[in-house]
Image: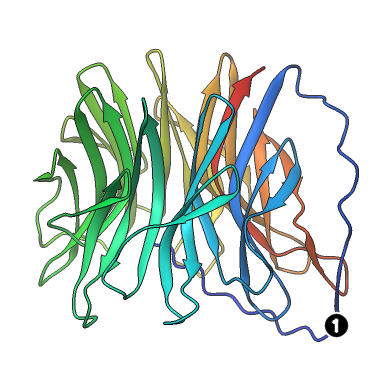
Amino acid sequence: MKVLLYIFFAVFIISACKKSSSQKPKDDNHGIDIYVSGTSYIPNGHAVACYWKNGVVTNLTAKDGLSAAYGIAIKGNDVYIAGHTLNPTTKLTVATYWINGIAHVLPDDNNTSDAYAITVNGTDIYVAGESTNANGSITSATYWKNGVRHILNGARANVIAVSGSDIYIGGFGYYPDAVSALYWKNDNVINLTPTSEYAEVNGISLNGSDVYLSGFVRSSNSWDLATYWKNGVPVQLEPDTTNSFANAMYINGTDLYFGGSIYTKSGSLKKAYYWKNGNSNKLTDQGNILGIMVNGPDVYMAGSFRDANDLSNAAYWLNGKMVPLSSSYYLSDNSNVAFAWGIVVLQH
């Protein structure tokens, strides 16, 4: 899932230290493995793709790798993560996915590309993102199936789901007057909002023959409103009095869950929220939810919060209780800077 949220971050701290990995914490998850994908930062502002399993971090690249990790999927014993790495020749970001820590760079036109979501169906691996043409003039929504690139009629593909032989992708397109929400079914584009209305899709779930998408729509009053669509029909989650975003979604039986944020125009920071069947629940005053999953009665969410030093920290939430996630790299004051993006939980 991805909000139109580009992570531009630099930390200007001269002295830093790298802590050695602590021993694995006691398993208090009652037979549940919790996987969270994300990105950590080192003092020079370089990003490092990583994931956490039950709170223990694994870095996917070296600390000078300039990488990021977004979507995550688990199949059997294999961990799949989508993101980007740095092309050492062109010094441009390239769409990449990892299987159990092994990087697979996806083909592009030798220009920038990125991968935001990943899913596995049988033996097929699907990755969604964006790629730029060779001269850098056009950025297109893109997906890769088993490494083969498919260019879509749109600007960016944020999420992907597969059912049988059908491929569903959500994202947005660039139009003369706005960025407009849309999705694709088997490469055929379906607009969810007028091309003059600013909107995005950042979450997707399939339930039988029903297609659910989540994101936001900008109102005539210039508020961004958390919204979901069921088979193309929009449902507004918050009133037209505040900014709100439904960044991720999950369906459990007849219950609809959404993760995201709410904030006002007064310049306040985002407050992390989730919704269950339209009812909002605040998690923290300064944070954002980017991933959500439900396992039985338990609701798991991944995102970030701001600490006392106003730095972003990765975390997951279990039934509303926040669990901070530490990265391998620490600033001189022992603080972390990291973001968590996707979450998957498995019974073992």
Question: The residue tagged with tag 1: helix, strand or loop?
Answer: loop
Tell me the crowding category of disc 1: few under 14, some 14 to 19, or many 20 or more residues within 10 angstroms, Cα based: few
Q: Which residue is mark 1?
A: 15
Q: Quadrant of the C terminus?
A: top right
- Residue 3 visible in the current orientation: no
Instruction: Name the one closer to the observer, 12 or 273.
Output: 12
Q: Residue, x 15% and y 35% (percent of image)?
A: 232
Q: Residue, x 62% and y 53% (percent of image)?
A: 304
Q: Quadrant of residue 62?
A: bottom right
Amino acid carrying mark 1 in the image = Ser
Examine the rendered structure and indicate whether residue 294 appears above or below residue 304: above
Instruction: Name the one closer to the observer, 220 or 36.
Output: 36
Q: Residue, x 63% and y 36% (percent of image)?
A: 35
Q: Quadrant of residue 338?
A: bottom right
- In the image, 155: left or right of 175? right
Q: Position of residue 314 (x, y in %)?
A: 67, 53
- In the image, 207: left or right of 79? left
